[in-house]
Image (spheres, grey):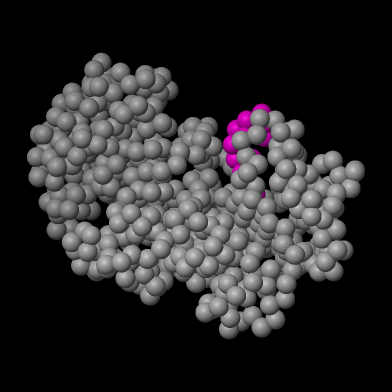
Amino acid sequence: MQSRKYPIGIQTFERIRKEHYLYIDKTDLVWKLTQESPYVFLSRPRRFGKSLLSTTLDSYFQGRKDLFEGLKIMELEKEWERYPVIHLDLSTAKNQQSADDLRMALLLLLKPIAEKYGRDEDEKLPGALLKGLIRRVYEQTGKQVAVIIDEYDAPLLDVLHDKRLNEFRTVMQEFYQPLKACEAMVRFCFITGITKFSQLSIFSTINNLMNVSMDPRYAAICGITEEELVKDMGPDIAMLAEEYECTPEEMHAKLKLQYDGYRFSEKSPDIYNPFSLMKAFGHRKLSSYWFESATPTFLIRQMQLFRTDITTMDKIEEPSSSFDRPPEAMTTALPLLYQSGYLTIKGYDRETELYLLGLPNKEVRIGFVEGLLPIYVGLEGGAVQKGFALKLWQALRKDDIDTAMRELKAFLAGVPYVEGFQKKLAEVKNYEGFYEYTFWLIFNMLNVYAQTQVKCAGGLIDFVVRMPETTYVFELKVNGTAKEALDQINSKGYALPYQTDDRRIVKVGVQFDRDTMTIGSYLVG
């Protein structure tokens, strides 16, 4: 079966259309966005199509009607009026060493536009030059200007927990200030990035920005919906199914488990990661493509700063004010975990106005556990090996608890020799909590449903693992015996909530030895 051309690594709308790459039509939403407000902000995780959206808006305001033939926008746009466009990609200005370096990077970004429209001698700062350029473009063309800024927050994210942050933020405040001052000369201003719009910092002077990041009407403007996958990518699913020797329906289910599950508002459809989906079709292989680049250092620092409880990632209930906030106002890592795409909206309770957040899909879970968490908990350097985890999984799948506990004991016995582990262990006053972390890390590596501190009528269950045919209920004891742990499971009825399930229930009391820092003994009931 002949595969189509997938725009892997291509973010330019013009090229995608001219060279006949696969394009999922979002132009009705693009048009609607331009009619909504003259100033619009949208945040989305990396590799989610923000740059493609930016270049689509660029082509639209340039009046490139030829590029939109056959798309939904043709039924909506009648005028196709042309406007001059100032399109800036701030990702080219990141990784600067000083505030002066950042100013120079911004000036270089504006240089090609200045060469075309001119530059006054007193325009020494980036903001002054941007203001002058908007004015000259407006005067020389007689048309209002469309300003498109992609990756607006890129220069700041790398210094989020750095002494340079305030200096860099001052530079960016000066740079963005003209966008408000030039309102009469601006037809449309679109700003996009990862972190949320903030009226407290660099956007304090732009009080008329419309933030559509959590607007249900634009929830699907980036990414691929279930409807779009079925309607526009049926042949691609069939091609991949042939490669995996399964039915298209079975492949659809695999794709959904691997790449679906993002939601950006309480009424959002489930969204597939577009980058990973295109890579899977292009390479004819299901894999965790979203994590091919390095784990964001700013996110790891945020998690370390606030001592994030990694075991709660699938059961977070919070109001939007907890995760829809700017970096400088964050008191937990939750906002960046959400804004970076590691967490997404799983549900919404209208009565309490609380959002349920969790890991979106298998790809994110695997990348989160294999890439980010080992660094966070001090187990980097290959300590958590797939070979061990697979043996553990196979033992539990076969109800061979003795082999499973033997594998766990051997693994934990070797952990103290991992560089950085002893320091991490010394910081943890609750030893049982640390072992809960480690259990959670191991099982989530295999996309096995595992929970810690599970609420039930009898109290809090330390650890629950749900396998296809068996539910394992663990009670962990450091200051106690395996018998005491098992007795606690029975006396407090920890297994009762799972008796209505068809799965077999296995209760395991585990005692950890402080001296050897591994499993001392266990009992099964």
Tell me if 65 is positioned left or right of 134 in this view: left
Task: Say left or right for 101 vs 1.
Answer: right
Q: In x, y percent, where is residue 387? A: 21, 35
Q: How many marks?
A: 0
- Taking the spot 79% from the left edge, 51% from the top edge, the residue there is 115
Q: Position of residue 492 (x, y in %)?
A: 23, 43
Q: Quadrant of the N terminus?
A: bottom left
Q: Is residue 485 left or right of residue 462?
A: left
Q: Residue at x 21, y 59 (%)?
A: 244
Looking at the rendered image, the quarter that the C terminus falls into is: top left
Quick one: which residue is furthest to the top in this view? Answer: 515
Magenta stretch? 152-167
Q: Residue at x 23, y 53 (%)?
A: 497
* Residue nearer the viewer, 252 or 240: 240
Kindly give the residue lying farthest to the front in the view shown. Answer: 19
Magenta highlight on residue 191: no
Q: Is residue 193 visible?
A: yes
| Residue 484 higher or lower than 140, as above or below | above
Residue 410 in the image: x percent, y percent?
19, 25
Position of 181 relative to 465 (above/below): below
Q: Position of residue 129 (x, y in %)?
A: 82, 48
Please check the rendered image and state whether residue 165 is part of the magenta-colored stretch, yes or no: yes
Q: Residue at x 53, y 57 (%)?
A: 11
Toward the viewer: 150 or 318?
150
Give the camera-side residue of 311 and 43: 43
Examine the rendering and report whether any part of residue 347 can be seen: no
